[in-house]
Amino acid sequence: MENLKLLTVFFQAIENDFRIGTTHIAIFAALIQFRAGKDFINPIQAYSIEIQHIAKIVSPKTYHKCIKELDSYGYIVYVPTKNKNKRSSIYFHVE
């Protein structure tokens, strides 16, 4: 139920946000799906390739651009790691 609320709040917020495109939406939805598979933890720990696979995004460059934008626009908090053997952290704004 919490994921539905996250999606609802997200879609309400982006309704008039011209910066958000279909790739941003795909990544956000993929993050929600990934989170559901991890018992709804916050933050989730994920490799970019795991989210790319769910979102159907092939290019790592596109993924990183869009997830950083979602972070800078305030929809998530993205904490990347420089170590390729560690997952990045993604925090959701939950009430």
Image (spheres, rainbow, N blue to C red):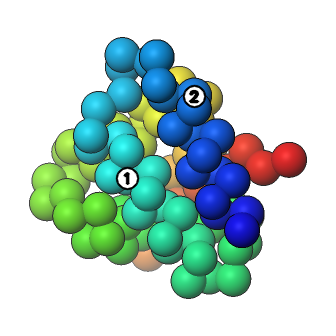
Residue 3 vs residue 39, the one in the foreground: 3
Residue 61 locus on image (x, y percent): 20, 45
**Where is mark 2, residue-wise?**
13
Residue at image point 27% right, 40% down = 22
Residue 1 vs residue 20, the one in the foreground: 1
Residue 65 locus on image (x, y percent): 31, 37
**Where is mark 1, residue-wise?**
27
Residue 79 shows in this picture? no
Left or right side of 60 for 77:
right
Q: Amino acid at mark 2?
A: Ala
**Above or below for 74 versus 36:** above
Residue at image point 21% right, 43% down = 62
Q: Quadrant of residue 49?
A: bottom left
Q: Quadrant of residue 54?
A: bottom left
Q: Kindly report the distance in space between the C-alpha atoms of the residues bearing marks 2 and 1.
A: 16 Å
Left or right side of 63 for 58:
left
Left or right side of 44 for 15:
left
**Above or below for 5 versus 76:** below
Of labels 2 and 1, earlier in sequence is 2
Left or right side of 90 for 85:
left
Task: Please state, as top left, top right, bottom left or bottom right, where the N terminus lies in the image.
Answer: bottom right
Q: Secondary structure at mark 2?
A: helix
Q: Amino acid at mark 1?
A: Ile
Residue at image point 37% right, 52% down = 27
Residue 78 shows in this picture? yes
